[in-house]
Amino acid sequence: MLLHDGTGGHCGNRDDSMDTPWVAVTIERRQQADRRAHPTSVWGTLRPHGRRQGFRRIGEGCNAYVDCPSRGVTWLLFVVIISSVLDALFTLVFLDHGGDEANPVMALVLSQGHTPFVGLKMALSGFGAWFLAAHQNFPLAFKALRGLAVGYLVLLLMHATILLS
């Protein structure tokens, strides 16, 4: 806000003589510190009520975190988690009909029972998907999340093909 020094003229009227000094005064109205002073950390993505889903300025969004995932990333997370659950269920159905687990690590876990198998599968899939979603503005992580969703959909098509044959 520009204020006149009181020697005549109106505030903001630049038609006064050149020798009249103008003083620029800013009035700070914010009560809180600027939240942009520190970027959101990866742990900030765990907060349940974050609002920041994107960035306002060009160039800010690359390799930076936001408070909550975007709509597209949320859909990809949904696809990955649901596909992981269906994959675990289809795997258990195949095992009951004489099939074998193709992944040697998960086959070892299956030797401990169905509950550890499903629990570990859900934990690994869920944590991996969350990690990639938390890094949604990192180009490699977003591509990996899309690749994971596509990979699970292809795997479900393979399960459906085997079930229908």
Image: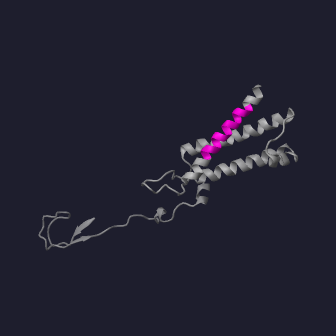
Image quadrant occupied by the C terminus: top right
Q: Position of residue 148 (x, y in %)?
A: 65, 44
Q: Please tell me whether residue 153 belongs to the stretch shown in magenta.
A: yes
Q: Position of residue 71 (x, y in %)?
A: 54, 43
Q: How many marks?
A: 0
Q: Please tell me whether residue 5 belongs to the stretch shown in magenta.
A: no
Task: Identify the residue at horizontal 73%, vertical 37% (top origin).
Answer: 86
Q: Position of residue 10 (x, y in %)?
A: 17, 64
Compare residues 71 and 14 and report the one nearer the observer. Answer: 71
Residue 16 appears in which quarter of the rendering?
bottom left
Task: Identify the residue at horizontal 55%, vertical 43% (top origin).
Answer: 72
Colour scheme shown = one colour
Left-right relation of 91 to 41? right
Left-right relation of 2 to 157? left
- For the record, the magenta segment spans 145-159
Measured along the vertical axis of the image, is residue 50 above or below residue 30? above
Is residue 53 something one can see in this rendering? yes
Task: Identify the residue at horizontal 79%, vertical 37% (top origin).
Answer: 91
